[in-house]
Image (cartoon, helix red, strand yellow):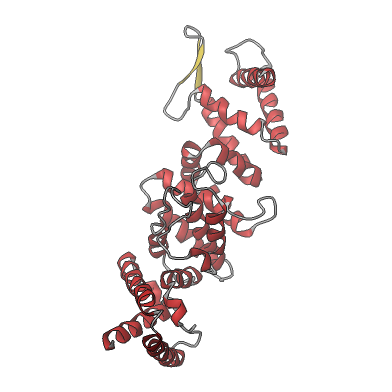
């Protein structure tokens, strides 16, 4: 029992440090060990929760530890016996709320979510116990329990991407009030894009952060911060347009005029990389920066069927681009004219069916 109490003391000190600037010295290995100790505390809770004598001894020890920690850390939050049952959540919550938490640690937290496939009783099991109980992860928890993990949750993204995006979003929100928030947020987002060799992964994570807000039409400081960062990182923005579902890109364009202009700019670049092959009677890619005509048309199809003011903006711009090419109706003379013809034909087929 003495060893158990000693270990609880060490873990309590670790949790207290996770709320301080000393967390700047942590790395991925430190976080891994911290969560291993959190697992140990959850094991202690499950083992002794129903044994009053031992539980009382642990509660007395925790009170003593909290008294000592309050003398060392002015903003210390007490750790209770109940907290031991969700110690991973407590640790995660404190790290996310701490603006001193380095990007490498935040990246380590992203890898901690592994939802199951939704089989059985339909409950989502996570790397963190009882995610709904975590204050700082409230939005992520609500999202998990409100969404069927067997389906794309929002904008064609899977639930894991939305959860990771929610973590990223909430940490950015904690950084915004600080005087050097701009550099802190830039460092965090730069770290995410640089540390993920899989461009699909970080593109979906960033999209998840943008889509997980409650009211996507209302002004949102966090969302604007992310969009502004994307504008200054054209390669990341291009990667997002290359790998994200078209539905996701359309919803992001609905959210932000910044993103709409950048997205349409990329679509224009893709169009300029197309050349009409008279022999084949079709548009072909003339360089490595383009996409097939059918793919380009699909992007515009979503924009013009969004049921949003985005639809009117896009159609007006397509017609202006067609007129800029001479307004020709014959196929092969204007990529914009051919896209409009293709969209008109798709719409006609849809109305018939």
Query: Where 142 sits versus 230, above or below?
Result: below
Q: Which residue appears at 58% of the width and 41% of the height? A: 262
Residue 26: where, in percent of width, then height? 35, 71
Residue 346 placement: quadrant: top right
Where the C terminus falls, by quadrant? Answer: top right
Residue 345 placement: quadrant: top right
Residue 220: where, in percent of width, then height? 65, 57
Residue 91 in view: yes
Query: Where 102 sits versus 126, above or below?
Result: below
Q: Which residue appears at 66% of the width and 26% of the height? A: 318
Q: Which residue appears at 61% of the width and 42% of the height? A: 251
Observer-nearest of 201 and 197? 201
Observer-nearest of 101 and 7? 7
Q: Which residue appears at 32% of the width and 86% of the height? A: 5
Residue 247: where, in percent of width, then height? 57, 37
Where the N terminus falls, by quadrant? Answer: bottom left
Residue 19 in view: no
Query: Where 154 sits versus 275, above or below?
Result: below
Residue 309 placement: quadrant: top right
How many numbered marks appear?
A: 0
């Amino acid at each position: 029992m003495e060893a158990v109490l000693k270990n609880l003391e060490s873990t309590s000190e670790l949790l207290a440090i996770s709320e301080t600037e000393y967390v700047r010295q942590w790395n991925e290995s430190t976080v891994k060990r911290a969560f291993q100790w959190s697992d140990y505390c959850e094991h202690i809770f499950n083992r002794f929760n129903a044994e009053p004598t031992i539980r009382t001894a642990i509660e007395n020890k925790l009170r003593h530890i909290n008294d000592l920690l309050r003398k060392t850390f002015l903003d210390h939050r007490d750790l209770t016996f109940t907290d031991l049952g969700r110690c991973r959540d407590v640790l995660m919550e404190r790290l996310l709320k701490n603006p001193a938490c380095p990007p490498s640690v935040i990246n380590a937290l992203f890898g901690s979510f592994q939802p199951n496939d939704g089989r059985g009783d339909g409950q989502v099991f996570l790397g963190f116990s009882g995610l709904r109980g975590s204050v700082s992860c409230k939005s992520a928890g609500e999202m998990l329990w409100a969404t069927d993990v067997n389906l794309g949750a929002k904008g064609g993204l899977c639930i894991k991407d939305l959860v990771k995006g929610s973590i990223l979003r909430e940490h950015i929100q904690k950084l915004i009030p600080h005087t050097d928030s701009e550099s802190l947020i830039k460092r965090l987002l730069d770290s995410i894009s640089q540390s993920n060799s899989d461009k699909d992964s970080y593109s979906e994570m960033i999209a998840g952060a943008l889509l997980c807000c409650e009211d996507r039409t209302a002004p949102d400081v966090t969302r604007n911060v992310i969009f502004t960062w994307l504008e200054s990182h054209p390669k990341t923005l291009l990667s997002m347009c290359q790998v994200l579902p078209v539905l996701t890109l359309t919803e992001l364009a609905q959210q932000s005029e910044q993103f709409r202009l950048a997205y349409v700019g990329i679509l224009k670049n893709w169009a300029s990389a197309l050349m009409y092959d008279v022999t084949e009677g079709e548009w072909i890619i003339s360089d490595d920066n383009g996409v097939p005509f059918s793919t380009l048309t699909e992007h515009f199809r979503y924009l013009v069927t969004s049921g949003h003011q985005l639809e009117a903006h896009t159609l007006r711009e397509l017609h202006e681009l067609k007129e800029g090419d001479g307004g020709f109706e014959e196929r092969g003379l204007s990529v914009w004219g051919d896209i409009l013809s293709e969209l008109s034909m798709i719409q006609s087929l849809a109305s018939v069916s």
